[in-house]
């Protein structure tokens, strides 16, 4: 099948979703430009800053569109075929993911720009807030593990992209000094540094680098440490070069998290956005040009992935459907829906939408294009990932190898625009790596903030130590490295996907509780149906990983060594803990909704403002939460703050 039809399918469903469903949701939550947003109400010039819609849309999109909407669809298409992957993206994105992002942003906007943890705490009590924050904290550790593995695999297969990425990080630091220390003009600097990032691709082609020696490295690769890194824990399970890059990535995430945002985070976000728009837009344009004007055959050779094929047309070369069970990943239900952890629906987006983007909305109506529309944009990125992997016919069944198919397939697409194959593949590898690096260090910083919120005001020496930025980031880095030690993508990604999708379900739970407390007349179907489906999918997936797959692998002696077995055991513990937190939060949320909807009293307007003199739904739910915790004194009512 021509891949152009896959693009058109997504464009049709996404257009219907944005023009029709998002407009209904905007009316449903009563978006009103006459109502003051938190950005104006609490304007402080630092966090609460009204931003132009186009500027905020770009920042929000670059924050959510990391490496996951590439890695997940690639893995799912390789495991189950391109048809299930495309259908889940095309249908699930506008009905599940975009709703999730829009409701997370809207609920935060109506709660002073606070996080979803704060919001759930308002309705079910501090216990629910802490449970959600702990869940998000564990998910962040999984993000670091999964993305470190991805970056190591990409840099190993494409040493040219490794060189370009190192230069890209160095340029981001220099750009930060240029802007914030030297106070030099933005526009000429932006032109020079963006051009330098693209020039870094040429440098990578001339001087590819590897950290450790291995068989099959491209000719001319500069090996920095030879065989001196064979002692690394993952060197035997994968190969020394991947193991070394994984360690470097974890150390990078640590450094980026503790540095001031102007040093790396802000200038890197800007440079990443230029790569994002060029890479995704270029591939979509190449599909159109190659399909309508013509596509010249191109040889694609990637020894690290066992790829040595000729792409002669822009048609799918892998099977549309390969079966209901993948031998390494598991059954299509639930693993299709957690493997595509981004691109369709992602809990990580709720952390960005609520409490971050919500603090910068200039007008309430901006929530529609930014919350709903940006998720559709990420869906297009996921579609390009499926297309890139589907035009490369490979004989390998390894999901690890499928990961590096994206730069190869993306590079093949760009040849339709006249770009040489090697340069195109190196550029797409840089695009992929830049997304992953952005997500990894952003996740580490968010995880540090979450631990600080869990601890609150530190009183004991242990609490003060826990909120120390070096200690808290160290916990995240060490935890991520320990979880990645299983050494196989089939083990790492489904656990991350299960946790991330469960976080999405919990964000939908928060939105459902908010709507139930807002008004007895608010329908709960738009958030409730995705909530029920995602809870079912993710609980089954996490239990399968924690109770069935990992224990069987360990007991059968197939883990690949003591370190890998210990990592699998740790993953099982994490999966079971996540299920426990999920079921506990679900119980608290359902209890709140039943209490509110079973009481004839007046509900909360806008998630916080009382409409008359009677008790608000928030008060009633708080009282119930306090009773459940055994902390409410007899005959007293908590204040509504």
Image: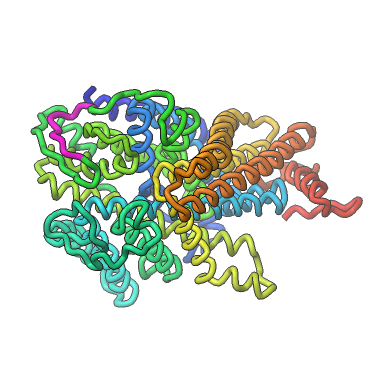
Give the magenta part as a residue range. 307-316
Residue 422 shows up from this direction = yes
Q: Nearer the viewer, residue 456 or 67?
A: 67
Q: Nearer the viewer, residue 490 or 333?
A: 490
Residue 222 point in image, percent of width and height: 17, 64
Q: Quadrant of the C terminus?
A: bottom right
Q: Quadrant of the N terminus?
A: top left
Q: In the picture, residue 84 is in which quadrant?
A: top left
Residue 348 point in image, percent of width and height: 48, 48
Q: Residue at x 23, y 60 (%)?
A: 213
Q: Nearer the viewer, residue 113 or 628?
A: 628
Q: Magenta segment: does it hold 117? A: no
Q: Is residue 446 above or below residue 593?
A: below
166 vs 627, left or right, is: left
Q: Residue at x 21, y 42 (%)?
A: 408
Question: Which residue is most to the right?
Answer: 635
Residue 360 shows up from this direction = no
Q: In the picture, residue 210 is in which quadrant?
A: bottom left
Q: Magenta segment: does it hold 311? A: yes
Count up the numbered dots: 0
The scheme the figure's colours follow is: rainbow
Residue 421 point in image, percent of width and height: 13, 44
């Amino acid at each position: 099948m021509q891949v152009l039809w896959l693009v058109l399918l997504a464009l049709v469903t996404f257009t219907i979703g944005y023009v029709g469903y998002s407009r209904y949701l905007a009316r449903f939550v009563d978006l009103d430009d006459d109502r003051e947003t938190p950005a104006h109400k609490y304007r402080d010039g630092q966090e609460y800053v009204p931003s132009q819609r186009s500027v905020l849309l770009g920042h929000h999109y670059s924050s959510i569109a990391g490496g996951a909407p590439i890695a997940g669809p690639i893995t799912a298409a390789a495991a189950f075929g391109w048809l299930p992957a495309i259908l889940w993206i095309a249908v699930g994105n506008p009905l599940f993911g975009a709703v999730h992002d829009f409701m997370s942003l809207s609920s935060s906007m109506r709660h002073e720009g606070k996080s979803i943890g704060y919001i759930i705490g308002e309705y079910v009590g501090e216990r629910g807030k802490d449970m959600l924050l702990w869940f998000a904290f564990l998910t962040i550790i999984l993000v670091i593990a999964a993305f470190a593995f991805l970056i190591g695999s990409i840099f190993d297969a494409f040493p040219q992209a490794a060189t370009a990425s190192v230069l890209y990080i160095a340029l981001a630091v220099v750009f930060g000094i240029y802007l914030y220390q030297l106070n030099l003009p933005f526009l000429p600097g932006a032109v020079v540094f963006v051009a330098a990032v693209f020039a870094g691709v040429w440098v990578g082609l001339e001087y590819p680098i590897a950290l450790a020696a291995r068989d099959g490295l491209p000719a001319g690769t500069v090996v920095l440490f030879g065989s001196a890194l064979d002692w690394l824990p993952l060197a035997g399970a994968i190969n020394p070069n991947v193991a070394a890059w994984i360690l470097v990535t974890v150390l990078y995430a640590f450094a980026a998290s503790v540095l001031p945002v102007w040093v790396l985070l802000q200038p890197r976000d800007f440079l990443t956005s230029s790569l994002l728009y060029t890479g995704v837009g270029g591939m979509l344009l190449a599909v159109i040009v190659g399909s309508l004007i013509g596509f010249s055959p191109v040889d694609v050779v990637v020894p690290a992935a066992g790829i040595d094929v000729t792409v002669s047309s822009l048609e799918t070369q892998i099977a549309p459907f390969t079966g209901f069970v993948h031998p390494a990943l598991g059954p299509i239900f639930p693993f299709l829906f957690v493997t595509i952890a981004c691109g369709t629906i992602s809990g990580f987006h709720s952390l960005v939408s609520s409490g971050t983007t919500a603090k910068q909305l200039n007008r309430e109506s901006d929530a529609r294009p930014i919350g709903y529309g940006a998720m559709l944009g990420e869906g297009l990125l996921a579609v390009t990932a499926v297309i890139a992997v589907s035009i490369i016919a490979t004989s390998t069944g390894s999901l690890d190898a499928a990961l590096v198919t994206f730069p190869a397939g993306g590079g093949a697409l760009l040849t339709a625009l006249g770009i040489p194959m090697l340069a195109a593949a190196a550029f797409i590898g840089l695009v992929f790596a830049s997304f992953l690096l952005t997500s990894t260090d952003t996740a580490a910083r968010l995880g540090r903030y979450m631990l600080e919120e869990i601890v609150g005001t530190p009183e004991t020496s242990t609490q003060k130590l826990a909120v120390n930025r070096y200690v808290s980031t160290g916990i995240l880095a060490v935890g991520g490295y320990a979880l990645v030690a299983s050494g196989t993508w089939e083990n790492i990604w489904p656990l991350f996907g299960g946790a991330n999708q469960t976080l999405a379900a919990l964000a939908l739970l928060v939105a459902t509780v908010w709507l139930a407390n807002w008004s007895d007349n608010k329908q709960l179907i738009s958030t409730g149906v995705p909530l029920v489906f995602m809870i079912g999918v993710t609980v089954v997936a996490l239990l399968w990983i924690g109770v069935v797959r990992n224990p069987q692998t360990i007991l059968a002696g197939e883990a690949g060594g003591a370190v890998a077995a210990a990592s699998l055991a740790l993953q099982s513990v994490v999966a079971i803990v996540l299920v426990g937190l999920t079921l506990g939060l679900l119980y608290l949320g359902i209890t709140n909704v039943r209490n509110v909807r079973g009481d004839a009293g007046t509900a909360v307007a806008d998630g916080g403002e009382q409409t008359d003199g009677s008790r608000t739904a928030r008060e009633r739910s708080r009282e119930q939460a306090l009773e459940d915790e055994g902390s409410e004194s007899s005959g007293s009512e908590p204040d509504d703050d």
